[in-house]
Image (spheres, helix red, strand yellow):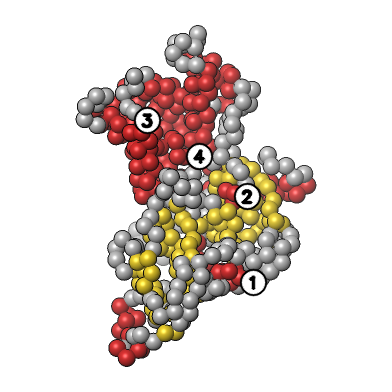
Amino acid sequence: MPIFDDSYLQSLIDEGEIEISRQIRLIHNRIAIATTAGNSIYSLPTNLIGIRRVTWKGNELPALSVIEMNTSDYFRPQNLMNQTVPKWFNPLNNNYEKIQILPVPNESLVDTGDLNDSEIIKERFIITGIFLAIPTGTTYRLPEFMRRNVIKFYAMREAYLREGKGQNLTASEYFGNMYSTFLGIYKEIMEAIPRAVRYSLEPNQHRKIARPQLPTTGKWSF
Amino acid sequence: MTRNEIREQLSRSLEDQGLIHFTNDDLNDSLQDGYDLIALSSLCVERITSLTFVANRVYYDFATLISNFYSLTAIFNTRTNRWIEIKPYGWLATCGDNWETLHGETQFAAPVGISTIAFHPTIQESAGEFVVLYKAQAPILGDTSQPEFHPEKHSILLDYSFADLMHQNLEYAKANLKFAKFLAELNTVKQFIMLKDQPARRFALLCQYLTTPTSSL
């Protein structure tokens, strides 16, 4: 008779995958959003946790800043609802639930097609963002090569911590430490990837850092 | 050392030569887990392959195109016989707000997340290839195959698996000791690979690949 039933462990595994994707922020994706002329506010996927780039028909929209609100002619009351080509985006709250694009778009765009193709990118409203894992799907998942290794420690830490049958605080502490260690290892590994400069492209580690002998009043006398 | 030899040593150190507590599969799975982690941390497994340019394609998903892809090292454009410069994704914005829609011979590439690589500029016809040097995930170890890092350091796998199997037996103190040893040794393996992995090697590896195309180095 197992201590923990499968469905409970599966719920911890799913929870662990979401938690790790929040900690390491490694799931990046690009999504297109369908727009309607005259509408400036759009809903975002619930698992979006960060925006890296927003483009309107291939042109990057910067995040709206206070300087632009103060200096741009667009932000005068008589101009606010003019429909034209969007120039800025504005996340409407801290949870990235909705996004506003300003000025109000004058065009309706669809959200279909291959977003890797520059000809499609020219005709879409696209957001490049960081997402949380969705363990029940296939698109937003932790990579296979790290998933099992880290999640098992998260799940075991939580399982042994549960009140009642099977509670084992020593085991929970051990797996908690292992989870932290592995999370640290993978964080380091994953954070190095987007830098794009791996060991083989970095300067030779054998070289010494330059330490020039600079003239000082004590050592040099003329 | 081959996996067979490592497994025998592991059984001895676990005082389980008769495979009573742990089966061969337990030991093999644990050794593979350790090898996976070492390969990811130290970047010891290196491969090379070539892919075809697709017209107007800005983003290539290397995880789909290369089955064991893990991390990018370098890309060589055979259309121009030039290395493609690898930049951070944010840097591409300095090429223009609309860099994704610009055409020309590809000069820059930038990783977006783990396996998607953005190319800039993009070519307008599907012609020519680019050679990708990359760090790969650990291959599956067979009984007679050897891990692809220095044989002197193969004992690190014993430390990992000992710790991994001990905690399954609820022997946390022993597992902790061995895991700490594993982490210390992992750093030395990383240092060793880092020192060996010099920029000039890219050129030699590319020459070798262009003469005799084979993915193993």
Residue type of the residue flagged with mark 2: Leu
Instruction: Answer yes or no: are tags 3 and 2 on the same subunit.
Output: no
Q: CA distance from mark 3 to mark 4?
A: 23 Å
Within the image, what quadrant is residue A217 found in? bottom left
Q: Kindly identify which residue carries mark 2.
A: B65
Please state if A173 lies on the left or on the right of A206 as rendered. left
Q: For mark 1, does the 10 Å Cα neighbourhood hold few (<14), some (14 to 19), or many (20 or more) residues?
A: some
Per the model, the C-alpha gap separating discs 3 and 2 is 35 Å
The residue lying at 59 percent from left, 31 percent from top is: B140
- Does any portion of residue B97 appear in the rendered image? no
Query: Where is residue A182 drawn, in percent x and y?
Result: 39, 37
User: Could you tell me residue B191's position as x and y percent?
Assistant: 50, 39
Q: How many marks are shown on the rendered structure?
A: 4
Sequence-wise first label, 2 or 1: 2
Amino acid type of the residue tagged 1 in the rendering: His
Q: Chain of mark 3?
A: A
Marks 2 & 1 on one chain? yes
Q: CA distance from mark 1 to mark 4?
A: 35 Å
**Residue located 30% across and 31% down the image:** A159
Q: Are marks 2 and 4 on the same chain?
A: no
Q: Are marks 2 and 1 in contact (CB under 8 Å)?
A: no
Establish if A88 lies above or below A19.
below
Dot 4, crowdedness within 10 Å: few (<14), some or many (≥20)?
Answer: some
Comparing labels 3 and 4, the label whose residue is closer to the camera = 3
Binning the other alpha carbons within 10 Å of mark 3 as few (below 14), some (14 to 19) or many (20 upward) gives few
Q: Residue at x 21, y 27 (%)?
A: A164
In this view, the residue in front, A92 or B74, is A92
Q: Amino acid at mark 3?
A: Asp
Q: Quadrant of residue A63?
A: bottom left
